[in-house]
Image (cartoon, grey):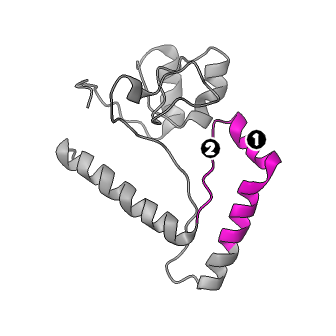
Amino acid sequence: MAGVDLVAVHYRGVGPALPDLMSGRVDVMFDLLFRRLVFIKAGKLRALGVTTTTRRDVLPDVPSIAESVPGYEGDDWTGISTAANTPPEVIAILNRQVNAALADPAFNARLAELGVEPFPSSPAAFGKFIGEYTEKWGKVIRAANIKTQ
């Protein structure tokens, strides 16, 4: 979308990539905000942008990439899933418990400190979200002719 040509440097996870980023061996890395926030706040890494459509409360001075590249969104998320044959009543209990935790003010305060914005959901809504997310990034992959190595 930005017309930027980046060379991908493949690592076996973000753990081995971090020293290369911090030493300047690689110039840029896309990673989950909560994993790098401590380094950003300590001045050891500089955040160039967040991939959400708007700025994050935890880093209000860091622009969203969408501010420079209209329409860009590459937000990260975490969800909980289980085996397809899990009984519906077990899924309902898990969903209630997760949503209760996400409603807890102390838990939410800790998530906010990490730059995590929870979005409680239902199993059906989460399934719909995953389908839309898969379709969105599938289009990106096909348009960019991205192939696995």
**Left or right: 3 with respect to 30?**
left
Q: Quadrant of residue 144?
A: top left
Q: Secondary structure at mark 2?
A: loop
Q: Position of residue 38 (x, y in %)?
A: 67, 26
**Left or right: 145 with respect to 30?**
left
Q: Position of residue 82 (x, y in %)?
A: 56, 72
The span shown in magenta is 94-121
| Up-down relation of residue 10 to residue 136 (above or below) | above
Q: Secondary structure at mark 1?
A: helix
Q: Please state which amino acid type lies under the numbered disc 1.
A: Arg
Q: Position of residue 57 (x, y in %)?
A: 63, 30
In space, the residues marked 1 and 2 are separated at their CA atoms by 10 Å
Q: Quadrant of the N terminus?
A: top left
Question: Is residue 112 part of the magenta span, yes or no?
Answer: yes
Question: Is residue 93 part of the magenta span, yes or no?
Answer: no
Q: Quadrant of residue 86?
A: bottom right
Q: Please state which amino acid type lies under the numbered disc 2.
A: Glu
Q: Position of residue 56 (x, y in %)?
A: 58, 31
Graded by Cα atoms within 10 Å as few (under 14), some (14 to 19) or many (20 or more), the crowding at tag 2 reads some
Graded by Cα atoms within 10 Å as few (under 14), some (14 to 19) or many (20 or more), the crowding at tag 1 reads few
Residue where numbered disc 2 is placed: 117
- Residue ID at (65%, 29%): 58
Give the foreground label among 1 and 2: 2
- Residue ID at (56%, 58%): 79
- Residue ID at (38%, 63%): 131
Residue where numbered disc 1 is placed: 110
